[in-house]
Each structure stands twice: as structure tokens, then as C-alpha cells.
Amino acid sequence: MAINGRFEQVAFLLASGSTQEEAARKARVGIRTVTRWVHDAGFQKKVSDYRAGMVERATGIMADAMSAAAGKLKKLLDAKSEQVQLAAAKAIQENGARLLENHDFEKRLAKLEANADESELAAATAPRLREAMAG
């Protein structure tokens, strides 16, 4: 990834796990400059944005690998060895149950968030509605 400017480079390096000292050395800026940037809200957001992008890409790679792993486990259910079949069956049951539980949790959370957004919208518009009805 091409990074323009030392500010951007240091933010990227810190998001990637470099220490402040390493980032300062690699970007050829003073450690005091890096320390000052680290306390800046805009810089903190830049580091957070870089890190979020990295996590997003890693999540996509993991999701792809999970599909391949699930396919492999499914094939292992037909293995000659009953020990291998049993291990595959256990892995599918344990991980499948966790996956379903997480999926259900995400759906419930999304519903709660939508309800909260609707409640906030209703609370924000209620005074204006009362005013309009009274006027």
C-alpha cells in the first residue's frame, strides 16, 4: 500500500503494530513528533481507520478460508477411518453451534439497534409534532 506523507506513514505503521519508536525510525521523523501525533484526535482516527481496513480485509480472508474448511470437514465425514469421521463430526457440531449462536445474536442485536434508532427518532420528532398539533 502506497502511503503519502510521514503523518500517513506513521499512522499506517502504528495501525500495523509497530511501536512508536519503530514508526518514527521507519518514517524518519522524531519520536517527539510521533508522540505529539499520537495525542491528536485526527491522527488517532487515521490509525483507527487503517486498522479497521486491515481487520476488514482479514475478515474476508478468514470467511473464505472458513468455507474451504467447512467443505473439507464435510468430506472427512466419509473418510475410511471412523476416528477421522468422529473428529470431523464433532468439529462440525461444535463450530456449527457456535456459528448459529453468533448469527442469532447478531440478528437480535441488529433488531435492538433498529428499535433504538426508531425510539430516538420518535423522541426527537415528538416535540415538533406536539407543537404542530397545538398551533
Image (cartoon, helix red, strand yellow):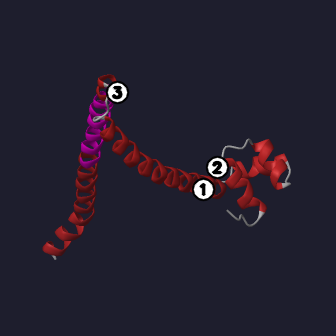
Q: Secondary structure at mark 3?
A: helix
Under mark 3, the amino acid is: Val
From this view, report whether residue 9 is shown above or below residue 96: below
Report how far apart the C-alphas of labels 1 and 2 lie in the structure: 6 Å
In which quadrant is the C terminus drawn? bottom left
Q: Which residues are magenta?
A: 87-107
Task: Say which label, 1 or 3, has the lower sequence index.
Answer: 1
Would residue 7 appear left or right of 15 to someone viewing this image? right
Which residue is pictured at 64% across the width and 49% down the height?
A: 15
Q: Are marks 1 and 2 in contact (CB under 8 Å)?
A: yes
- Which residue in the protein does label 3 denote? 84
As for residue 49 lying within the magenta part, the answer is no
In the rendering, at what x and y percent does residue 106 appear?
29, 46
In the rendering, at what x and y percent does residue 75 appear?
32, 40
Q: Are marks 2 and 3 in contact (CB under 8 Å)?
A: no
Would residue 18 appear left or right of 80 to someone viewing this image? right
